[in-house]
Image (tube, rainbow, N blue to C red):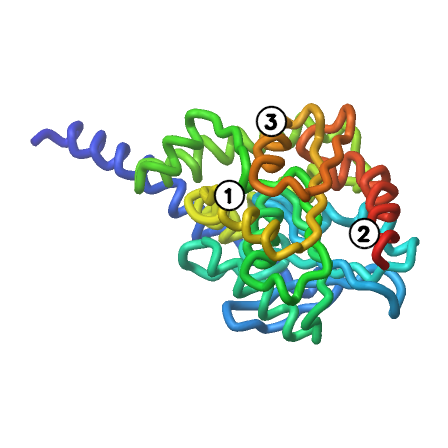
Amino acid sequence: MGIGTVIAGLGVAGAGLWPFAAEWRRPKPNWDDAPGELVQLSQGVTHYRWIGPVRGPVVVCVHGLTTPSDVWLSLAEGLGAAGYRVLIYDLYGRGYSSAPGGRQDRAFFLRQLSDLLEDQGLTEDLTILGYSMGGAIATGFAAENPHRMKRLVLVASAGVEVVRDQLTQFAIKTPVIGDWLHHGIGMARFRRHLATTRDARTEVPGIADIQIAQLDRRGFRPAVLSSLRGMVAERQEADHRTLGREGVPVVAIWGKDDDVIPIRALGTLAQWNRATRQEVIEGAGHGLPYTHGAEVATLLRGILRETD
C-alpha cells in the first residue's frame, strides 16, 4: 500500500470522524448566564422560569424539538398579564438544561416533566401547554395522568401529522451514517435556515440567534436526533382517544401555513377526539408561540377564562 493511499484513507477517516469530534469540543451551557432558576432532577439539571404574578392559576409550558423555552416569552407574558402564573423550562439538551445521554423518548421526557412538577409542588388541576414536540410530551403526560389534568392545550403539536424532508428521514432510520449526516450536513442546513429568519416576524427579539447559539453547545445536536428517533416518532392516536374517554378538555391551535405540522392534522385529531376544541391562526407558520404569541395568548385567555 503506497503512502498516498494511506494518506487518502486517513483523510477519509478524519472527515468521517469530524462531526463527532467537533461535538466533544463544543462547550456546555454556561449556567452563570442562565436567567431564572436551576434545579437538579433525577436525569440532570433543568433550567426553569416563572412568569406572571405570584398567585393565580398555573400554566406549564413545554417547548419543541429545536427551540429553547425562550420561544414562550411573548405568549407567557400575555397570559401573565391576565393573571396566570406561567412555568417555562428547557428540555434536556436545549437551552440551559443538562444534556444527559440516552434515548430521548416518551419515558425520558415524561420523567423530566414529572420531576419538575414534583419539585415545584404542582400535583393536580394542571393546565399544560405544549408546542410542537412539546405537544406530544404534554399529550403523553395527560393520557397517563388524566386525573391530574384540568386541561391540555396544544400549539402546532406533534404526534398527529409531521412533515419530514428526505435527509431527516434517512438520518432517523440509518445509524452511524445518519448520525454523521445529521450532525454535519443537517445541522449546517438548519443554521443557514435560521439565519434567513433573522428579519422575519417575531415577538421574541433575537429568537433566531438564540436558536443558532444552541448549535454550538455540546449535546444539542445529538439530543435533536435522539428525539426525532424517539418522542417525535410517536403517532398518538391511542393517547388522544384516551383523553376523549377520560373527558380531559383539549384545545388545539394550528398555524394555517405551517409546513412542519400541516393543517391536515386538524382533521386527523378531530377523528381521534371529537371533543377537542380546535382553532386556526391565519397567516401563521410553525413558529406560532413567537410569531403570533400575543394573538395566541388573547385566544387562550378567552378559553381559559371559561373554566378559571
Mark nearer the viewer, 1 or 3: 1
Q: How many labels does the image show?
A: 3
Residue 154 placement: quadrant? top right
Q: In the image, what residue occupies the spot 33% across and 42% down? A: 17
Q: In which quarter of the image is the N terminus?
A: top left
Where is residue 87 shown, x and y percent of the image? 74, 61
Mark nearer the viewer, 2 or 3: 3
Q: Are marks 2 and 1 in contact (CB under 8 Å)?
A: no
Q: In the image, what residue occupies the spot 69% across and 65% down? A: 32
Q: Residue 264 carries which label?
A: 3
Q: In the image, what residue occupies the spot 44% across and 39% down? A: 183
Name, please, the residue furthest toward the left. 1
Q: What residue type is labelled 2?
A: Ala
Mark 1 vs mark 3, CA separation in Å: 15 Å
User: In this orientation, which residue lies closer to the viewer: 219 or 40?
Assistant: 40
Tag 2 residue: 76
Circle 1 SS class:
helix
Left or right: 49 in relation to 97: right
Q: Which of marks 2 and 3 is nearer the N terminus?
A: 2
Mark 2 vs mark 3, CA separation in Å: 27 Å
Q: In the image, what residue occupies the spot 63% across and 45% down? A: 67
Left or right: 88 in relation to 166: right
Q: Which of marks 2 and 1 is nearer the N terminus?
A: 2
Mark 2 vs mark 1, CA separation in Å: 29 Å
Where is residue 305 shown, x and y percent of the image? 88, 53
Callout 3: few (<14), some (14-19), or many (20+) C-alpha neighbours within 10 Å? Answer: few
Tag 1 residue: 237
Where is residue 139 shown, x and y percent of the image? 59, 51
